[in-house]
Image (spheres, rainbow, N blue to C red):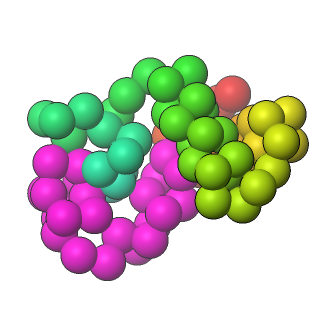
Amino acid sequence: MTCESCSLPLVADADHGASDPTNRYCRYCTDASGVLRPYDHVLADFTALLVRTHGLNETAARETSAGIMAAQPAWSGR
């Protein structure tokens, strides 16, 4: 199973929002209660992660993040 917002693998309960194994979203895409955060917040955090971990510049990281997110059920209408 993967996060339906960012595609992060949901392996352990702690990977899910609010550590709820039935939550379809990961702990990074949700708030403390497990509710999906707004698109712009998730996109900004995902972009920053790619800059930090993959060395992409801001523009490339944002385009990559947006592309991955657009393929996920939570954001398919964007």
Identify the image quadrant of the C terminus.
Answer: top right
Query: Percent from the top left, x then y, of residue 25?
Result: 35, 50
Q: Residue at x 58, y 48 (%)?
A: 49
Q: Which residues are magenta?
A: 1-23
Q: Residue at x 47, y 53 (%)?
A: 4
Horizontal side of 21 relative to 54 (left or right) equals left
Query: Percent from the top left, x then y, of residue 67?
Result: 77, 45
Location of residue 47 with respect to 39 vertically, above or below = below
The picture quadrant where one finds residue 75 is top right
Horizontal side of 47 relative to 56 (left or right) equals left
Was residue 22 drawn as part of the magenta stretch in this picture?
yes
Location of residue 65 with respect to 26 vertically, above or below = above
* Frontmost residue, 2 versus 27: 27
Identify the image quadrant of the N terminus.
Answer: bottom left
Location of residue 8 with respect to 69 vertically, above or below = below
Query: Percent from the top left, x then y, of residue 2?
Result: 45, 67
Please identify the dominant SS of the magenta region.
loop
Was residue 73 drawn as part of the magenta stretch in this picture?
no
Horizontal side of 9 relative to 60 (left or right) equals left
> Can the viewer see residue 71 in this picture?
no
* Frontmost residue, 9 versus 52: 52
* Frontmost residue, 60 versus 20: 60
Horizontal side of 23 relative to 46 (left or right) equals left
Q: Residue at x 34, y 53 (%)?
A: 26
Query: Percent from the top left, x then y, of residue 40?
Result: 56, 21
> Can the viewer see residue 24 in this picture?
yes
In this figure, what is the number of numbered marks?
0
Q: Residue at x 54, y 60 (%)?
A: 7
